[in-house]
Amino acid sequence: MSDFAGQTIETARRALAARFKSAAIDSAELDARMLLGAVLKLDLTGLITAAGRTLTGSEAAELEASARRRLAGEPVARILGQKEFWGLPLKLSAATLVPRPDTETVVEFALSILRADGALEKPLRIADLGTGTGAILLALLSELPAAEGIGTDISAEALETAHANALASGLGGRAAFIACDYASSLSGHFDLIVSNPPYIPSVDIAGLATEVRQHDPLAALDGGADGLDAYRALIPQAAGLLVPGAALVVESGIGQSEAIEALMTAARLVPAGPPRADLAGIPRAVACRKLPR
């Protein structure tokens, strides 16, 4: 029998938050509210308005199942099957990373470069290498009304997820998806290329948080011995596809920005300003440009 059987919505919320706090889950209150809201199909206002209603037996059982998954280390986003990124609700799958707020730094940096160029309204061609859920590409397309984009991934399941997210976001007409390793099957020229590749050094994978280590796909995490394998592959590919003056913006792991900039320089690309820090002050987005002819 569920611990939540016979409880009101408010009592269940408090009990769930207490269980999460006792398990040292930092986001206990938020997680409890999100899981309860998902089970009851209520937003925050709805949870407050209906606080005195008693949970049905099936609701209590569903909430208990979600609680046990969270207590076992599964992220809330995985339990809900979606995660918001740049204001877009994105569907997840086993082949995709959970989009993280840090990655919005890549979107912000890319948009700031385009804004400085006066290119926000231009018919740009964008590529997102290793697109996963399509998060970065779709965020950019949502801000660039005349742009079109291509997302690549080696995972067919990830591409299906990204395509579904594009359609759900109303951006399906401007987004295409191709199965390949980074930019290996792309042709033509691009006005902007972005990527959040795997960058965790292989030896560090075992030390990642349970939420990441056991629930994010290994292929989207493991960056090889020094975490830079993906950059060694994609930076030269991107350099050959960018139009003169165009930018490449990539996400960076902790302490990797200088090494990534060196790889960019080796590909005859020039820095597009200092790395952009995330909210924790960590250099998170690195950008470069192709030299004008």
Image: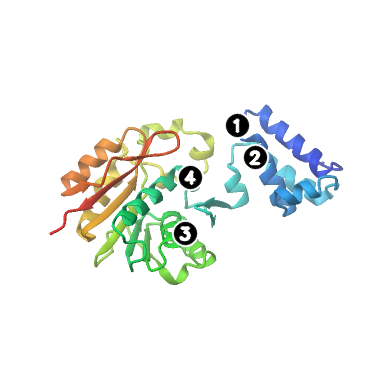
Q: Quadrant of residue 227?
A: top left
Point out which mark residue 157 bears: 3
Q: Are marks 2 and 4 in contact (CB under 8 Å)?
A: no
* Amino acid type indicated by mark 1: Asp
Q: Nearer the viewer, residue 198 or 138?
A: 138
Q: CA distance from mark 4 to mark 1?
A: 16 Å
Q: Position of residue 246 (x, y in %)?
A: 25, 57
Q: CA distance from mark 1 to mark 2?
A: 9 Å
Q: Residue at x 40, y 56 (%)?
A: 131
Q: Nearer the viewer, residue 290 or 181?
A: 290
Left/right of residue 86 with respect to residue 204 in the rendered view: right
Mark whose residue sits in front, 1 or 3: 1
Q: Are marks 4 and 1 in contact (CB under 8 Å)?
A: no
Q: Mark 3: which secondary structure?
A: helix
Left/right of residue 86 with respect to residue 30 in the rendered view: left
- Reading the image, the residue beneath label 4 is 100
Q: Position of residue 286 (x, y in %)?
A: 31, 44
* Disc with the residue nearer the chain's start (2 vs 3): 2
* Amino acid type indicated by mark 4: Arg
* Amino acid type indicated by mark 3: Glu
Q: Residue at x 48, y 48 (%)?
A: 99
Q: Mark 1: which secondary structure?
A: loop
Say whether residue 182 is visible. Answer: no
Quadrant where the N terminus sits is top right
Q: How busy is the neighbourhood of tag 3: few (under 14 within 10 Å), some, or many (20 plus)?
A: some
* Disc with the residue nearer the chain's start (3 vs 4): 4
Mark whose residue sits in front, 2 or 3: 2
* Disc with the residue nearer the chain's start (4 vs 1): 1
- Reading the image, the residue beneath label 2 is 30
Point out which mark residue 26 bears: 1
Q: CA distance from mark 1 to mark 3?
A: 31 Å
Q: Is residue 109 above or below residue 175?
A: above
